[in-house]
Image: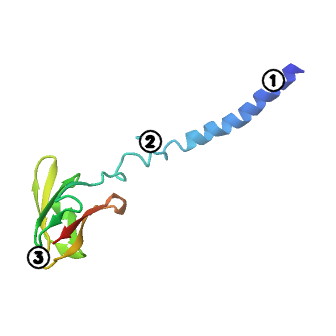
Amino acid sequence: MKWFNFLGLVAVSFWVYIPAVQATEHHSGHGAGMSGGGGAGASQCQKARLERFNPPHLAKVAPGSDFSFYAFNIDNPGQLSATVKKEPVELTAEYKEPYFLVKGKLPAHLTHTAARIDIKAAAKSAHCEEEKGWLLIIE
C-alpha cells in the first residue's frame, strides 16, 4: 500500500512540474532579465538627480536673489526648466564633471511672499522625467 501511495505522489509531482517547466521555457525571452525582451535595454533610463539646492529650503532671501542646484544624469542643460510661482525662470548651467551647476534668479517683483522653485528635468520617456523643488521666503 505504501508503494502505491509513493507512485501516486510521484505521478502528481510530474503532472505539476512538467507544465511549469514548459511555461518557463516558453516565456524565457520575455522576462526582465538582462538577455530578455524587457531588460536593461532601451526601455530603461537613469532619472536626473537634482540636489544641493542653494539657498536651502525655507531660507529667507531678498527679491531677485540668485539660486543654484546640481543636476546629475542629464545630457545637456536644455533638458532643465524652472518656474517660480508658475513663472518661467531663465537658467544657466556650467558642466563640472560629473554634474551641471545650474543657476537662476528669483523674479525681482516677488516680495514679502513664499515662493517655490520648481525644477523639471525632461526626458524622452515620461517615466524618466524628474521634478523637484524647494520653498524660499522672499522678504
Question: Residue 138 placed where, x, y %?
Answer: 17, 71
Q: Give amino acid for label 1.
A: Phe
Residue 18 location, quadrant: top right
Q: Which residue is mark 3?
A: 108
Whether residues under marks 3 and 1 lie with C-beta atoms below 8 angstroms apart, the answer is no
Q: Give amino acid for label 3.
A: Ala
Whether residues under marks 1 and 2 lie with C-beta atoms below 8 angstroms apart, the answer is no
Residue 77 location, quadrant: bottom left
Q: Which residue is mark 1?
A: 6
Label 3: how many residues lie within 10 Å, few (<14), some (14-19) or many (20+)?
few
| Disc nearer the start of the sequence (2/3) | 2
Closest to the observer, 1 or 106: 106
Q: Give amino acid for label 2.
A: Gly
| Disc nearer the start of the sequence (3/1) | 1
Toward the right, the furthest residue is 1
Question: Residue 12 placed where, x, y %?
Answer: 77, 33
Name above or below for residue 114 compared with residue 76. Answer: below
Label 1: how many residues lie within 10 Å, few (<14), some (14-19) or many (20+)?
few
What element does badge 1 sit on?
Answer: helix
Judged left or right of residue 8, residue 101 is left
What element does badge 2 sit on?
Answer: loop
Closer to viewer: mark 2 or mark 3: 3
Which colour style is shown? rainbow
| Disc nearer the start of the sequence (1/2) | 1
Which disc is residue 33 wearing?
Answer: 2
